[in-house]
Image (cartoon, helix red, strand yellow):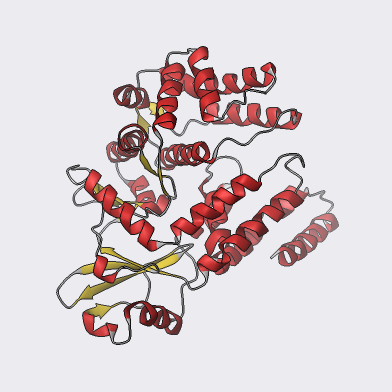
Amino acid sequence: MAGGIAGTMLVDGAKQWAQGKRPSVGDLLLTPANARKIADKLATMRGAAMKLGQLMSMDTGDFFPPELAEIMGRLRADAQHMPQGQLRNVLNQNWGRGWEKRFASFDFKPIAAASIGQVHRARTTDGRDLAIKVQYPGVRQSIDSDVDNVASLIKLTKMLPPELDIDPMLADAKAQLHEEADYGHEAAHLGRFGALLADHPDFIVPALHPDFTTTDILAMDFIESIAIEDTVAMEVETRNRIVRLVVELLLRELFEFRLMQTDPNFANYRFDPVSGRLVLLDFGATRVVSEAVSNSYRTLLRGGLGRDLAQMREAGLALGMLHPDAPENHKVAVLGMFDTAFEPLRLDGPFDFTSNEVTTELRDEGMAFAKERTFWQIPPVDTLFIQRKIGGMFLLGSRLKANTNVNRLIRAAL
C-alpha cells in the first residue's frame, strides 16, 4: 500500500512540477486515487486494520475533504466478503455437515460485510427470518499483530513524543477487539440490551437465536430497515427525533443502565421507516460502566452546564482527563477546553450539530496544546471508550444535520 501510494505521489508531483506548480506533500497524499487505494487495502485486510479506517472515515471535520471521506466511508460496511467455498467451510465447522437441511433458504451473497464478519439472510424450515453474522477465519489470530502494526506506523510518524507510553492503551485495544471477536460475548450483551429496551416504543433490538449461535456465528432476527445515513434525505423532524433518541440512549447507558455499547460506527444504527423505530445492532464493544465513572460524568455535566470550574476540575481528575501531577497551566488549559465544549450546550434551545465553530475552536486549542509537549498523558481506557461513543454521537448528529435541545436531555438525565 505504501509503495503504491508513494508511486502515485511521485507521478502526480512530477506532472505538477512540469506545469510550473509547487504541490505540497499533503495535496499529493490526500487524493481520491490514494484514498481509494487505502480503502481497498484496508477492506482486503479486514479485522483491526479495517477498524482503523472506519474510525478515520467517521470524522466529518477537516481531516478529509468530502470526496475522500465518501471513499473511506464505504469501509463502515464494505469489507471484501468470503468466497462461497470458504464460507461453507466455516458453516460446516460450526453447524456440522448437513446444516442446509435446517433452512428453507440461505442467501450466500452477504447483505453486509464489515471488519470482523459478514451477514447473510436466511429462512429456517420452521419459518424464522434470520440475519446470520459469520466471522472471517483468522480474525482473532490477527488482532494482536494488526494492532502492533498500526502502533508501529503511529510511532514512525513521530507524532507522539518518545516518552509517551501507549503500550497500556494498546493492550486494552487488543483485549476489546478480542471481546468483539467472541460472538458468544456479543450474544450475551445482545440479550441484555434486548431486555433493557424491551418496553421502549422507539427502539428495536433483534432477538437472539441461540440454537444457531456459536463463537464464530451470531444468529438474530432479520429486521427490514435502512442505513441511518440514508435518513439525511428525510424531513428535518425525523432527523431531529433520531438524534434525540440516540443522545437519550447514550445518557441512559451512562447513568441508568451503566452498560454502554461503545462502538459509534454508523452501521450499528438503522431505521425502520414503517414503524419509525431505531434498530440497534452490534453489541461486541459493550462495556460495563462503573458507578465511580458514572458519578464522575454526572459531576462533569453538572459542572459544565453550571459553569462550575471546581466541579469540572473534580470530575476531570476522577476521569483521568486531568493528571494530578500536571502543571497548573496544563490543568487550566484543559478546563478551558471543557468550558469551550460546554458553551453551546448551556443554552436551553436547539443545538445545531452542523455548526463547526466550537469544533474548530477546540481543534485549534488542542493542536496548540499538543505542540507544547510539556505534559502528555493518556486517560484511562474506560474514559477513552466513553469519549469515543460521545464523539460518534455528535458526528452522527452532524451527518444528519440535526437541531436538538441537548441541554434539556442532559438536565432530564441528571
Q: Nearer the viewer, residue 200 or 145?
A: 145
Q: Nearer the viewer, residue 124 or 35?
A: 124
Q: Residue at (69%, 27%) from the top-left corner?
A: 369
Q: Is residue 163 left or right of residue 116?
A: right
Query: Does residue 64 show up?
Result: no
Q: Quadrant of residue 206?
A: bottom left
Q: Is residue 63 left or right of residue 373?
A: left
Query: Does residue 385 show up?
Result: yes
Q: Quadrant of residue 313?
A: top right
Residue 83 image point, x, y percent: 46, 80
User: Which quarter of the figure is the C terminus placed in?
Assistant: top left
Q: Quadrant of residue 317?
A: top right
Q: Give the vertical position of 346 relative to 165 (above or below).
A: above
Q: Nearer the viewer, residue 36 or 330?
A: 330
Residue 228 image point, x, y percent: 35, 50
Q: Residue at (37%, 31%) from the top-left corner?
A: 403
Residue 190 image point, x, y percent: 30, 54
